[in-house]
Amino acid sequence: MTAAATWSTDGLPPERTPDAWSSKVSELHAAWVMSFPEPERFDVSARYRKLDKLTIGEFRTGRCAGRRPASGWSAEPLVGVLMNLSGRLVYRYIRGEEFVLEPGQLVIWDSETAHAFEAVEPHRELYLLLPRERVPQGLAEAAARANGAVPAGPGSGLLAIAAAQLRAITHELDQLSDAGLAIACQSFFDTLDSALTVPSERPSPRASLLLKVRQYIEDNLDDPGLCASSIAAAHGISVRTLHLVFADSGTTVNCWIRGRRLKACYRELSRARRMDTVTDVAFRWGFINVGHFSRTFKQAYGVTPSSVLAGARSQRSESASAK
């Protein structure tokens, strides 16, 4: 299991603090070129955990600023989520737009549109960073649009729920297994994706159809024959219409089915019975190629299905020994 780590400038000579944080922020966030208005008074602490290419954690920093370097910025496109808990931050996009991130607000940013930031006062933030290819498509598109800050406090609906999930995950960094951390972060991304893509007004006929189709998929996940053709036939629509309905939500029907089946497999593997195998679980939820299932599972959650199963058996053995 990967472990949560802490880092701070406590005990460092003041003259070494800026360079130390500049190096650390490149490891934990992105390769910002840092500057400090009051370097002799700057201090920072970080608590974080890294799993595969996912990084999640918490910063407490003094006043500082960062800008995108002229070269060597990011080897692959990244999407970051930042929840501001205290203090104010100014963000600037590469096209020149600027906004202020107030406490209780959240921003989703893309490494290809981000340009600079400035903590104009000491602040505390929660953050999560992941390669764009592993983020829900709708959320990745929202990050690329560079729309600025969104409220995530009480009264903001799904955004408030997503913010609460992020707080809970960072609070439990020491207790979550690798698989638990991966699925908790995926659940957070799914909630945030829905918060930014589901309209708040009365749903359109196409949106209503999408809800019905998703429920149908949920009810038939264990059917190996579940596919676009069978779903379209069950709802009296063409396969083309079905694909258009899912395109509106930023994904495809096949990706949706695969994602729901993977989550069902994760739940079952984490509670598996003594005689269950990865093959049993994969077949039960419609995966007919175990090798492909294992690769897809690892890509989605950062851990293998066999490691989730082994962890479940280990916990069950420990519980039995304690009785």
Image (cartoon, helix red, strand yellow):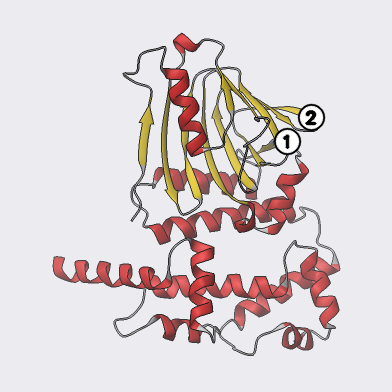
Q: Where residue 223 appears, x then y in whole percent?
A: 59, 88
Which of pointers 1 and 2 indicates the residue nearer the eye?
A: 2
Q: Where residue 40 appears, x then y in whole percent?
A: 45, 9
Residue at 66% from the left image edge and 54% from the top image edge: 193
Q: Is residue 59 visible?
A: no
Marker disc for residue 272: none
Instruction: Say which of 8 and 315 sits in front.
Output: 8
Q: Where residue 195 appears, x then y in whole percent?
A: 68, 51
Residue at 51% from the left image edge and 54% from the top image edge: 185
* Left or right of 202, for residue 224: left
Label 1: element kind: loop
> Mark 1 — residue?
148
Q: Where residue 229 appears, x then y in whole percent?
A: 76, 87
Residue type of the residue flagged with mark 2: Glu
Residue type of the residue flagged with mark 1: Gly
Residue at 36% from the left image edge and 35% from the top image edge: 6
> Mark 2 — residue?
97
Question: Gap in Å between the C-alphas at discs 1 and 2?
Answer: 9 Å
Q: Residues within 10 Å of mark 2 (few under 14, many from 20)?
A: few
Q: Are marks 1 and 2 in contact (CB under 8 Å)?
A: yes
Q: Quadrant of the N terminus?
A: bottom left
Q: Where 78 falls versus 183 (above or below)? A: above
